[in-house]
Image (cartoon, rainbow, N blue to C red):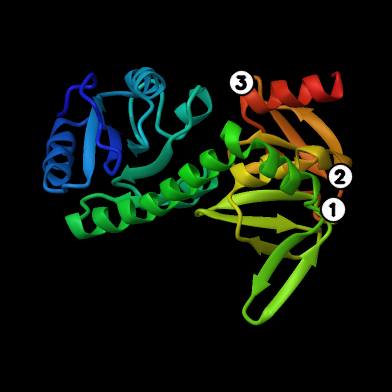
Amino acid sequence: MNNKNQPNTASKMRILFADDELPAREKLSHQLSLMEHVDVVGMAKNGKEAISLINELKPDVVLLDIQMPEINGLELIDLLNYQPIIIYTTAYDQFAIEAFEHASTDYLLKPFPIARLKKALAKAQQLLEQKRAHCQVNSPEHEQTFALSENTLNKLISKNGERIFLLSPGDIKFIKSEQGNSLAWNGDTFHHLSDTLDQLEHALVTKNFVRIHRSYLVNVDHIKEIQRWFNGKLMVIVNDDVKSELSTSRAGADKLKQLLHI
């Protein structure tokens, strides 16, 4: 494992992994050591330690075991001050759906071969490059250009084969991130968007959209009801025919309360 104080090579993906089982940590450490493009910056033995290390070291990618004592891999996501790219690892496939609902990039079922790990990290690398490009757009020298694109974003573009749909932001109930894809719900159909949720959050900030969870952007104009949920979270009910329910994170709940003065 590399010293966290050593300079990092820009081309390398900074990885932290967390698992409460020693054999699993040793195997994953060995697999990662065989990859030249990764830099392992930290290792955690439980959920609480993972939270501390992720917030401190700010890795690009976290390989996160789901079943850990005290705080499991699904619960700790909402407790982070810093949000890395998440790849879940577990021996139990029943957690797959919930893992993707938490906007993980991928899901590795133990025991996974190194080829499967490489595939997951390749997917994470693509997302990482998109994030870096987005950060460049938000840099001071690009601030004016980005502000212009934000103010002129009057339509969302959705491509489906040879068809291109122009969506009015005001008609969109919410946008969710699922398996690395951004999907806009208009009350009838989910439309695939090419932009990431981070990009859409900034572009739609003047269109009454608020980030209530790392997986959800909701149009405040389409919120029908808000219910108190557990652990300081809220349940947002949308005014569509199916009464879609969106759970906030604790940070998202605070943001929504502040915005709506509730």
Residue neighbourhood size for the residue with mark 1, other residues' Cα within 10 Å, grouped as few (<14), some (14–19), many (≥20): some
- 52 lies left or right of 11: right
Q: What is the quadrant of residue 139 in the picture?
A: top right
User: What type is the residue that disc 2 sits on?
Assistant: His
User: Looking at the picture, which amino acid does disc 1 mark?
Assistant: Asp
Q: Which residue is mark 1?
A: 240
The relative height of residue 121 versus residue 50 in the rendered view (above or below) is below
Look at the numbered discs 1 and 3 and tell me whether their residues touch, using CB distance below 8 Å.
Answer: no
Q: How many marks?
A: 3
Dot 2 corresponds to which residue?
A: 222
The reply to whether discs 1 and 2 touch (Cβ–Cβ < 8 Å) is yes
User: Dot 1: what SS?
Assistant: loop
Check the picture and name the quadrant holding the N terminus: top left
Q: Is residue 124 above or below residue 189?
A: above
For the residues labelled 1 and 3, the Cα–Cα distance comes to: 26 Å
Of mark 1 and mark 3, the one earlier in the sequence is 3
* Whether residue 95 is visible: no
Spot occupied by residue 5 in the image (x, y as percentages of width and height): 23, 19
Q: Earlier in the sequence, mark 3 or mark 2?
A: 2
